Image (cartoon, coloured by chain):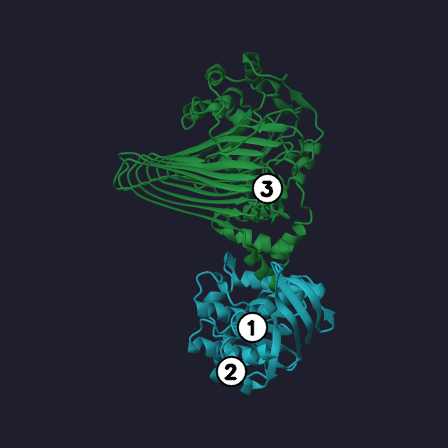
């Protein structure tokens, strides 16, 4: 890697949560609260077709009957769903025709977040969709992608321009009945990203969505739908930040991936929502449903680096429906101070010769709680299914907790399932060894932690891996006890 | 190079070093021998700056600086190197990344420029040859999956890379077969110069056939109780430590 420890050290000079600023931009908001009128309001704001409104209303009626799940190993004060603003959009809602039209305040926000829609993106070759609060505000590289038949746009736009594709696939992987937050999202989602890769096309650049919560008192409910048609390939990146606020903000997203025969989707997330302050005040509740389905010989690979959020509840999963399909989950979850994370994956083996790999690295510091929860399910027709799971936990202090909840359900005797788990405390011996070689404690921790996460970080695209390394170091600043 | 004066150190309230004196000059090799529990490894740990030990009395001058006032990393940056009895594994961190980080931190401390990747790799090739360390080991994770002998050779390789003023070898011979012992000793001898010094802590005389000390000290019950030349080591090998214990306890 071209990134040296010295550069890392320089980047670390700004150690606090550096995305905690608020952009002063006029917004168009719905009144607080949740009822059918609000849903109709959102739907009409978005000029949606009737079927989508019905879909939302149906989800809402299902959601009303559901109760918030309590099985996760997290404790928090449940959000008051009537005290949330479900729609908030930067006032200038029309899509920018050219970069010159973009609101200067918004440009500055993107610059602070390190998102450049201009030249730099052209050089690094990442197409970006920027979602602030409830709407997508800018998408780059659209025309270039269009030449290849690739659709990459905001979800709202997809509803208008490609209603058939949306209608065909939306809710097929995560049905509205799936869980409490998925049902809520299905009722009130406001925007997100949509992506379609046509048959046999290899997407030539990374596609990326950047999520940003700006307004106070709002929730962010976005949906991402990625459809990779037969034999296609796409690598998708997702980043998120939010301002520093004393209140807890709710983020309940749904991500659906569809990999048709012989297709491959690589989905990487660096999640850095505001985690709350050192006393545990504020922070984002990150309750997300992510799932992909693999048809014959298809592959879906989830990679996540989770460093933010006060509470994380997230299980990116794969349904391995087609024979010879492959599911992968690589995760680093860091919790510090009073953060709580309950995260993992589900690998559902339906097809024959399906294969899944789970590599989970939990790092707990401060007084945080970090849990891995995973399910490996081998159905009775899944002949010769294979799974390998490795769940490691690293403890930085005596006051934090690491928990592992692996579930295995196997209904086919030809399956081969391996599970390895380790828990270790960050070695005082390791740190002393580094110190004795002249390495400062701060750098020693960064080295040891990055080494521990290497298998996962190696899965990330280059620029993202560098970003993730920095985040890990920042999140664990001064955390050894 | 280093002057240790009346050093007292304890761990968990138990005194281990009880007024230790030792002076090592540049260009010299000193061997410290002694029975189990005499305080040999404690001396190495205290000098390197392990925090569990409490220094209750005494002083250590390291090349004009008050060593005990320096942090662990600054002691290393000032040129104190400890070859560990049990080298630590750091999974996922390559040996070269580890060493380059260390080298650059030391350089920065001295106000020098960072080493370029090219110069660094040339240095790795040159220094790894000294201990016949396979170049492949340099790119593997620090000590992970290394054999006992490889770990010890890796310690000397690191010493060669960091070019310390004072190296303390803590039981570097333990667990080594005769070939590895020869290689490690050769490495140490090659690195020896009139400007640096070495303290060899060992249980057995065997190592001293290869690394010939200028002085041999016997550490017993937290103090240096006898000093001599390399003949003392041979005498210890032959007669054991009991006669020294008897001598000391009689006083």
Residue A325 is situated, as x and y percent measured from the top left of the image, at 34, 40
Residue A276 is situated, as x and y percent measured from the top left of the image, at 63, 35
Nearer-N-terminus badge (2/1): 1
What residue is pinned by disc 1? B169
Q: Do the residues at pointers 2 and 1 share their chain? A: yes
Toward the top, the furthest residue is A37
- Residue B86 visible? The answer is yes
What residue is pinned by disc 2? B236
Examine the rendered structure and indicate whether residue A154 appears above or below residue A464.
Answer: above
Nearer to us in this view, B245 or A172 = B245
Q: The green chain is which one?
A: A
Q: Mark 3 lies on which chain?
A: A
Rendered residue at 48%/26% (across/down): A69
Q: In this view, does A174 lie to the left or right of B105?
A: left
Q: The cyan chain is which one?
A: B
Quadrant position of residue A232: top left
Mark 2 residue element: helix
- Residue A336 numbered tag: 3
Toward the bottom, the furthest residue is B231
């Amino acid at each position: 890697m071209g990134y040296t420890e010295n550069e890392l050290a320089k980047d670390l000079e700004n150690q606090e949560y550096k995305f905690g600023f608020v952009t002063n931009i006029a917004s168009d908001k719905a009144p607080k609260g949740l009822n059918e009128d609000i849903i109709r309001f959102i739907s009409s704001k978005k000029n949606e077709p009737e079927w989508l409104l019905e879909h939302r209303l149906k989800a809402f009626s299902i959601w009303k009957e559901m109760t918030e799940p309590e099985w996760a190993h997290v404790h928090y004060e449940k959000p008051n769903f009537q005290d949330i603003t479900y729609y908030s959009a930067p006032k200038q809602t029309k899509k920018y025709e050219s970069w010159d039209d973009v609101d200067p305040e918004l440009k500055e926000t993107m610059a602070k977040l390190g998102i450049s829609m201009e030249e730099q993106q052209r050089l690094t070759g990442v197409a970006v969709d920027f979602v602030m609060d409830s709407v997508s505000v800018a998408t780059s590289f659209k025309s270039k992608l269009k030449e290849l038949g690739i659709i990459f746009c905001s979800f709202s736009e997809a509803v208008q321009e490609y209603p058939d594709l949306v209608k065909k696939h939306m809710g097929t992987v995560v049905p509205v009945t799936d869980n409490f937050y998925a049902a809520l999202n299905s009722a009130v989602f406001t925007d997100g990203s949509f992506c379609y890769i046509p048959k046999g096309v290899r997407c030539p650049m990374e596609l990326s969505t950047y999520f940003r919560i700006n307004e106070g008192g709002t929730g962010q409910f976005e949906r991402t739908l990625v459809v990779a048609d037969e034999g296609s390939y796409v690598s998708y990146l997702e980043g998120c930040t939010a301002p520093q606020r004393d209140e807890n903000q709710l983020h309940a997203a749904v991500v659906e991936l569809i990999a048709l025969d012989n297709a491959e989707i690589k989905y990487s997330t660096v999640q850095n929502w505001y985690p709350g302050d050192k006393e545990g005040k504020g922070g984002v509740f990150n309750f997300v449903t992510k799932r992909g389905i693999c048809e014959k010989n298809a592959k879906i690979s989830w990679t996540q680096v989770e460093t933010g959020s006060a509470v994380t509840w997230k299980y990116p999963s794969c349904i391995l429906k087609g024979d010879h399909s492959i599911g992968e989950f690589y995760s680093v979850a860091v919790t510090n101070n009073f953060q709580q994370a309950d995260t993992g994956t589900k690998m559902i083996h339906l097809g024959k010769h399906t294969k899944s790999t789970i590599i989970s690295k939990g790092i707990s510091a401060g007084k945080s709680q970090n849990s891995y929860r995973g399910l490996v399910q081998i159905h009775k027709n899944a002949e010769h299914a294979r799974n390998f799971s490795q769940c490691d936990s690293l403890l930085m202090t005596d006051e934090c907790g690491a928990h592992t909840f692996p579930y295995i359900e196997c209904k086919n005797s030809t399956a081969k399932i391996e599970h390895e788990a380790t828990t270790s405390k960050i070695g005082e011996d390791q740190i002393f060894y580094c110190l004795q070689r002249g390495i400062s404690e701060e750098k020693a921790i960064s080295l040891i932690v990055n080494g521990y996460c290497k298998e996962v970080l190696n899965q990330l695209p280059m620029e993202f891996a560098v970003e993730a390394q920095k985040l890990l170091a920042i999140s664990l600043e001064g955390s050894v006890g | 190079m280093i002057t240790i004066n009346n050093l007292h150190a304890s761990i968990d309230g138990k005194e281990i070093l009880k007024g230790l004196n030792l002076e090592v000059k540049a260009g010299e090799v000193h061997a410290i021998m002694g029975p189990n529990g005499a305080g040999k490894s404690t001396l190495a740990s205290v000098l390197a700056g392990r925090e569990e030990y409490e220094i209750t009395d005494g002083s250590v001058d390291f090349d004009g600086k008050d060593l005990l006032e320096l942090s662990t990393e600054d002691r290393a940056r000032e040129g104190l190197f400890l070859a560990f009895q049990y080298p630590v594994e750091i999974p996922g961190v390559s040996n070269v990344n580890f060493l380059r980080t260390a080298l650059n931190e030391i350089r920065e401390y001295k106000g020098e420029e960072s080493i370029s990747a090219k110069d660094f790799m040339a240095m790795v090739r040159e220094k790894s040859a000294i201990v016949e360390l396979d170049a492949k080991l340099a790119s593997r994770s620090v000590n992970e999956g290394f054999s006992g002998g490889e770990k010890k050779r890796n310690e000397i390789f690191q010493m060669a890379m960091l070019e310390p003023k004072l190296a303390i070898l803590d039981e570097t011979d333990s667990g080594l077969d005769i070939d590895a012992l020869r290689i490690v000793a050769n490495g140490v001898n090659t690195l020896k110069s009139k400007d640096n010094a070495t303290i060899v802590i060992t249980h057995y005389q065997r190592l001293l056939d290869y690394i010939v000390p200028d002085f041999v000290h016997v550490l017993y019950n937290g103090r240096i109780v006898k000093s001599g030349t390399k003949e003392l080591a041979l005498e210890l090998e032959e007669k054991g430590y009991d006669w020294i214990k008897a001598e000391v306890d009689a006083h």
